[in-house]
Image: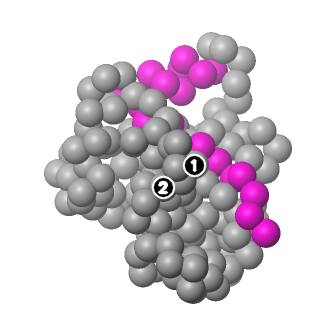
């Protein structure tokens, strides 16, 4: 199973973006912080799918955590923001990575990620990025897969599902 999950929209100022989306009538939910990437986020949902608004709150951490992706993200933010990636649901990240590699698709090894939510809870996941995105993709898009892990209660019921993120 591969199914659309979410779109990542980089914004220079998260609070301003939340206000702008709310002014347009969207219900935006507070997200949290990604300590390893120096980012924070919020989202508006369309049933189980969502648009993730994401901004940098610690540039030094973002430069270090986002590594080779940082220059392109920085250009996107300086230009006013824009779509940077999209997520897909997958049944099993490790199996997806193995399947892609067996077909000659270059994909990184799984890594750990986390979000510290405004309510103090923490969501943790494992992800692996494709080294090249789908053909015809915008140059700033990225492709990866992630699955939510962690102790019971560490993530909301909705975010326990396994999904992926395409980054390229």
Residue 8 pos. (x, y %): 53, 43
- Tell me if mark 1 has few (under 14), some (14-19) or many (20+) residues whose alpha carbon lies within 10 angstroms of its own: many
**Along the horizontal axis of the image, is 160 left or right of 99?**
right
Q: Position of residue 114 (x, y in %)?
A: 46, 67
The residue closer to the viewer here, 30 or 139, is 139
For residue 29, above or below residue 80: below
Q: Residue at x 50, y 73 (%)?
A: 105
Residue 29 falls within the magenta-colored stretch: no
**Residue name at image x 46 percent, y 39 percent:** 138
Q: Which residue is mark 1?
A: 86
At mark 2, the secondary structure is loop
Mark 2 or 1: the one toward you = 2
The reply to whether residue 14 is visible in this rendering is: no
State which region is magenta: 1-22
Name the mark on residue 153.
none
> Pointer 2: what residue?
133
Is the residue 123 above or below the residue 20 in the image?
A: below
Q: Quadrant of the N terminus?
A: bottom right
In which quadrant is the C terminus drawn? Answer: bottom left
> Disc 2 vs disc 1: Cβ atoms closer than 8 Å?
no
Work out which residue is located at the far left of the displayed protein and give it: 60
Dot 1: what SS? Answer: strand
Residue depicted at 42% across the width and 81% down the height:
109
> Looking at the image, is 149 positioned above or below residue 28?
below
Cα–Cα span, label 2 and label 1: 11 Å
In front of the other: 49 or 29: 49
Q: Would you call the spot at circle 2 few (<14 residues within 10 Å), some (14-19), or many (20 or more)? A: many
Earlier in the chain: of badge 2 and badge 1, it is 1
Residue 103, by quadrant, is: bottom right
Q: Is residue 33 left or right of residue 99?
A: left
């Amino acid at each position: 199973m591969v199914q659309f999950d979410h779109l990542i929209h980089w914004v220079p100022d998260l609070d301003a973006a939340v206000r702008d989306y709310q002014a347009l009538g969207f219900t935006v939910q507070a997200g949290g912080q990604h300590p390893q990437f120096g980012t924070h986020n919020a989202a508006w949902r369309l049933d189980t799918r969502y648009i993730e608004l994401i901004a940098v709150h610690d540039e030094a951490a973002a430069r270090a955590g986002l590594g080779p992706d940082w220059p392109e993200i920085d250009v996107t933010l300086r230009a006013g923001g824009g779509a940077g990636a999209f997520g897909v649901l997958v049944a099993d990240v490790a199996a997806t990575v193995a399947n892609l590699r067996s077909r000659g698709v270059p994909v990184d090894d799984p890594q750990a990620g986390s979000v510290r939510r405004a309510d103090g809870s923490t969501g943790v996941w494992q992800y692996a990025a494709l080294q090249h995105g789908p053909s015809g993709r915008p140059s700033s898009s990225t492709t990866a897969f992630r699955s939510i892990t962690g102790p019971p209660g560490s993530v909301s019921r909705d975010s326990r599902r396994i999904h992926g993120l395409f980054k390229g």
